[in-house]
Amino acid sequence: MPAYALDWRLERSVGASATLTDNANQSATDPENALILSVMPSFILRAEDSRRVQATLQYGLRGVARFGENQSTDLYHNLNAIGKAELIDDFLFVDGSARISQELISLLGSPADAEINDSNRATVGTYSISPHIQQRLGTFARAQARYTHSGAIFGSNVASNAVSNGFNASLNSGTRFTDLSWGLNYSIRDVTNRDRNVSDSTFERATASAGYALNRKFRVFGTVGQEWNDYLSATDTDGASWSAGAGWSPSRRTSLEASVGERFFGNTYSATARHRTRATNWNLSYAEDISDISRFLGTTGTVYDYLCLMDGELKLFDDWPFSFPPAPTNCVSFGGKPGLLFDLRNGVFISKTLRAGVSWGKGKLNYSLNAFDIRRDYQLLDSEDRSRGVTGAVNYRFAPKTNIIGSVRLARNEVPVALSGTTDREDDLVTLSLGVNHQFASDLSGALTFRHTQRDSNVADADFEENRLTASGNMRF
């Protein structure tokens, strides 16, 4: 589609903050007081009013100056770009994405954002481009074939740069089938690591699936398949697979789906549940899969919690995947936290991820409660690390343009000796946050936030406490 046929919308903004902290280096024995100033001009470019093209590009350059015992200045690039286009009507499509962010290097180091202390942060860039075709075979079936080229680039050589090439083909039942559904799928993904000390890997799988709707509310489904993988592992990498499950959707507001099965790494389980009422939203998910760092960083890594005033309503964004807020103004950040990939470690692993949450509101008060439990079983070392916790947040609308926000986060990280290199490590982290946000004008907002972070560890000199006060402002123009 010609570029001149697109309408683009440009939104510009600038954010600034000043932070006082009594332990910038999050040290147990030598805490350092610091004043940290930052400014980040940014823009959002969106394609609008096009059926064929959807694209959003968000970029910001954050400048940071730290004053204290260790004075320093830094620049951090942040990018979030995603787009898709329909090149030939209902046949040829292309998807693309790119991201630049500052990610946690090790679960055992300082958990601070790069702005406060970048000793345990590395700039990571990921990209992906994926052309694909789809074709309807009358009412009998829908066919799709997709090629994906992606990569991950790690600053400071904290992990091996990787390039991935993948192909996926599927054939699924068409509109002729109502109660019965079926599908055939094949996928292969080759990962090449630039570091010769990190082995390459291949993931290949073929499956056949079928489902049947017993009535409008209840359905059953199952899959059978075979996997042929090639990577360094202490256990088998190939084998047959199967799964069987059921889904229940009594209404548009409620759905539940669960399955059990077996793959080459053992028994597998999955579940998703959603329920919505006028005042509450409930969700739960559990999934298991095989992956590596190159795949996960495209969509996960450090995630953020934001509370934003949008269209006259308060919305809580849990696990927002970007350091950018969901809107240029009227957003308060609760800070970053580990996502599905909570640090940068090479190797193939089996991920087991449980997430659950509920949010509700009544009058001037809005609440949220979220829990997570994430495990990674590294196949070469036959060893598993784990991160789990719970976060509670509350917002009180004190006045039409003023909100008071508080949050509590409790987390435990467990890293065995095979991964830590020293000893079995257990860390308990507590984060308390209390702030006030005010909208001065339609394009100008500000916030004052106090944050307390504490870590208790079974390892000497790994404990710390930090108190932080941040004044921030955002302006859109």
Image (tube, rainbow, N blue to C red):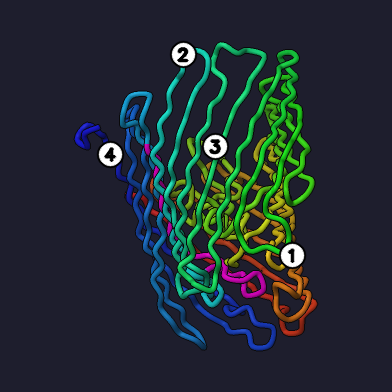
The residue sitting at 72% across, 41% down in the picture is: 241
Residue 332 or residue 87, whichever sits in front: 87
x and y percentages locating residue 7 in the rendered image: 26, 34
The answer to whether residue 247 is above or below residue 127 is above
Check disc 1 and report the residue beneath it. 382
Query: Which quadrant of the rendered structure holds the N terminus?
Result: top left
The amino acid type found where label 3 is placed reads: Glu
Q: Nearer the viewer, mark 3 or mark 4?
A: 4
Secondary structure beneath disc 2?
A: loop
Check disc 3 and report the residue beneath it. 313
The residue sitting at 62% across, 12% down in the picture is: 178
Q: Nearer the viewer, mark 2 or mark 4?
A: 2
The answer to whether residue 139 is above or below residue 38 is above
Secondary structure beneath disc 1?
A: loop
The amino acid type found where label 2 is placed reads: Gly
Work out how far the residue at label 3 is from the one at label 2, CA to CA, in angstroms.
Answer: 45 Å
